[in-house]
Amino acid sequence: MPKVVREDIDNLNAVLTVTVDKASYEPKFIEELKNYKNKAQMKGFRKGKTPTSFIKKIYGKSILAEIVQNMLQEELGKFFQEDETNYLGQPIPNDNSEAVNFDPRDLSDYEFKFDVGFVPEFELIGMESIKSFEKYVVEIPDNMVDEEIDRIQKQKGERIDAEDTIIENDMISMTMKELDGDEIKEGGWESTFSILVSRIANEDLKKEILTKKKGDKVRVNPHDLEDADETHIRKYILNMTEDDTDVIVGDSFEAIINSVNRVVPSELNQEFFDGYLGAGKVSSEAEFREEVRKDVGAYHSGESDGLLFRAMRKDLIANNKEQLALPDEFLKKWLVASSEQNTPELVDRDYDRFSDNLRWSLISTKLTDQFEIKLEEADIRNHLAKKISSYMGGYFGGNEEMMNNMVDRLLQDREQLTKASEELVDERVFQSLKSNFAITDRSITLEDFKEVLEKVREEDAPPPVIQVEDEEE
């Protein structure tokens, strides 16, 4: 029977010696030669009558190599299933391994040596509940609150068709017809489109349109409407398709204003407050402003949580770095072997980032056990549904069947499932850490907070990523 012997070099490294003995593989080798013989139809021989010696000469080496390699992988798989050691990466051939010569004429025992690395048992330190971390609380300026309230008023406002005036925030629909001099060109290009007046690029054209009303005409150069390249103008202003690539049009069009769509902002009154926040939640404009300020600040609060989690991670990695020593040389060799993109130079340069991420993964696993964090399928489904809603906005319109179908499709994608699970575990680890440590608020202006974020992004700017090939289960 094949066997695996582990020889520990130190508390981080070991060598596995796998012996695949002749007695184990020879019957399979002989059986496979017979199968080849029965199927082979070679020139000069009837089907199934090719001599075994000829089959062995032509196919023997590859057959033998495949059988031994399969037995080797099977034996390694059994070993790792039964061994409770926390191994890192995958076994890599030992530098002192001798090349194996699969000779079908001289069967013998085969020996393979592999380097492996593992993490020593460790007790997590740095979890003292008296430890304190700061969380930034961003001061939201009044102008941001004003802008958000203005946006909400317009969002909840009434849409009307304006007949007698045009203002900057109006959406106008126009039909353009190509001109030949001052007359409509026979067979010329025609296009109907809509545009927000405030987006009109040419200021003179914008001022002229602001003096017009529904039904009026204005002379237009399509390139004056938006500050965009030729491709954009042809596609979105002239409504040309790929079939119109060869169509050439002039710069002079007569445009008639078909409609003027205007949003009349909602008034700031109790009906509006109740409709947006819920009945009776606020009773004055001042209270409404503070609720809006909280909503605006919620996004930055999420960014602030990200900085807080980052500080906690860095602290725990630093506290546990000494006891979480890694088999660095083994891991570097494994990284180079695991992907053609991982050159020794790239691995050396980016290894510190990789090793700290690996340490955090080990710490996170320990925290998951310590905080008894467990995920159910319903948790992952809810997490994915929230992500879809944030990406798609109101696209599903409350249609649960459509949402469930999309979640089902994502759950069938192993990469998406793994990513969602990791995100959810991170969220729960973070919430548990927040409950474990003392958190103090630190007020900061939005401008200063943006500077802090920019500095952190520069520090965390990812180098070219060390590739780790996904191992099949």
Image (tube, grey):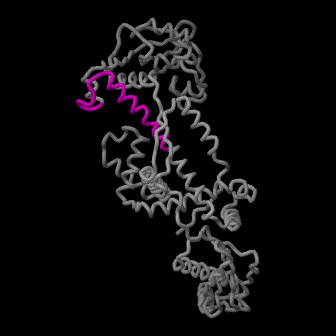
Identify which residue is drawn at 64% across, 43% down.
Answer: 459
Residue in the foreground of this view, choosing between 53 and 418 = 418
Q: Would you identify the image quadrant in which residue 175 lies?
A: top left
Q: Is residue 112 left or right of residue 279?
A: right
Pinpoint residue 269: horizontal percent, then vertical percent: 27, 20
Up-down relation of residue 420 to residue 263 (above or below): below
Residue in the foreground of this view, choosing between 412 and 64 = 412
Identify which residue is drawn at 66% across, 84% down.
Answer: 64
Question: Which span of residues is magenta-colored?
Answer: 277-305
Pinpoint residue 281: horizontal percent, then vertical percent: 26, 31
The answer to whether residue 466 is seen in the rendering is yes
Q: Is residue 115 left or right of residue 371?
A: right
Q: Would you identify the image quadrant in which residue 397 lies?
A: top left
Residue in the foreground of this view, choosing between 172 and 388 = 388
Q: Would you identify the image quadrant in which residue 389 lies?
A: top left
Pinpoint residue 113: horizontal percent, then vertical percent: 69, 79
Q: Most extreme residue toward the front, as rendered?
A: 130
Identify which residue is drawn at 37% across, 18% down.
Answer: 261
Q: Is residue 222 left or right of residue 197?
A: right
Identify which residue is drawn at 37% across, 29% down.
Answer: 292
Q: Is residue 301 magenta?
A: yes
Residue in the foreground of this view, choosing between 34 and 404 = 404
